[in-house]
Image (cartoon, rainbow, N blue to C red):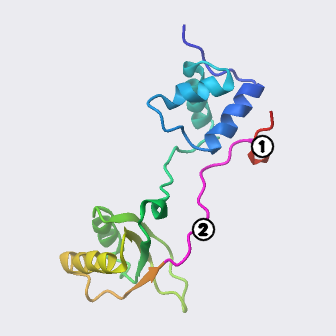
Amino acid sequence: MERVCQAHESDAHRHLRALLEQGLPLTPRPWQALAEQCGLEEAEVMACVDRWQDEKLIKRLGLVVRHRCLGIRANAMVVWNVPDEQVARVGQALAQESVVTLCYRRPRRLPDWPFNLFCMIHGIQREQVLAQLELLVHHHGLAEIDHQVLFSHHAYRQCGGRYAQGGSYAQ
């Protein structure tokens, strides 16, 4: 018999929220692993996550890749000053490229910041990233569009969503 997530919050449910902050376990059955840690059934964990998504407590489940641990240390944000009438087309084209891991539009902050399109390219070496960018510029005819390449020098802490009150669970 499948259990559903109860509407009232128990210690097990608060513990589950705290565990979700740490990320899903890297196992074939992550929901089962979480259930075992919380004293719940796998179906109840899945029902809770579904309910929390319906209630907008959890907006999405995503993935934080710690790319520097994988040797990917040449990380460049390419900022573009694309004419407004072209930015949607250029953004969609860049977003389709496998070397572009992130692409989004933002308002310009004139007079100091004329850039309105941002895309991230990760690589092992700067030369690799710059070569990939050169191919993108050539392939999409972007040579005349002003852009800058901003390589990161420091990795700041990345974390997922926070769902438990106070950010942790005390047993």
Residue 56 visible in the current orientation: no
Mark 2: few/some/many CA within 10 Å (<14, 14-19, 20+):
few
Q: Camera-side residue: 121 or 139?
A: 121
Please tell me whether mark 2 sits on a helix, a strand or a loop: loop
- Mark 1 vs 2, N-terminal side: 2
Q: Amino acid at mark 2?
A: Tyr
Residue 150's quadrant in the figure? Answer: bottom left
Q: Residue furthest bottom?
A: 111
Instruction: Name the side, left or right, on which 17 lies relative to 95.
Output: right
Q: Residue at x 26, y 79 (%)?
A: 131
Mark 1: few/some/many CA within 10 Å (<14, 14-19, 20+):
few
Magenta residues span 152-165
Q: Residue at x 22, y 75 (%)?
A: 140
Q: What quarter of the picture does the N terminus occupy?
A: top right
x and y, in percent, of residue 56 in the image? 61, 41
Instruction: Please give the label number shown on residue 156.
Output: 2
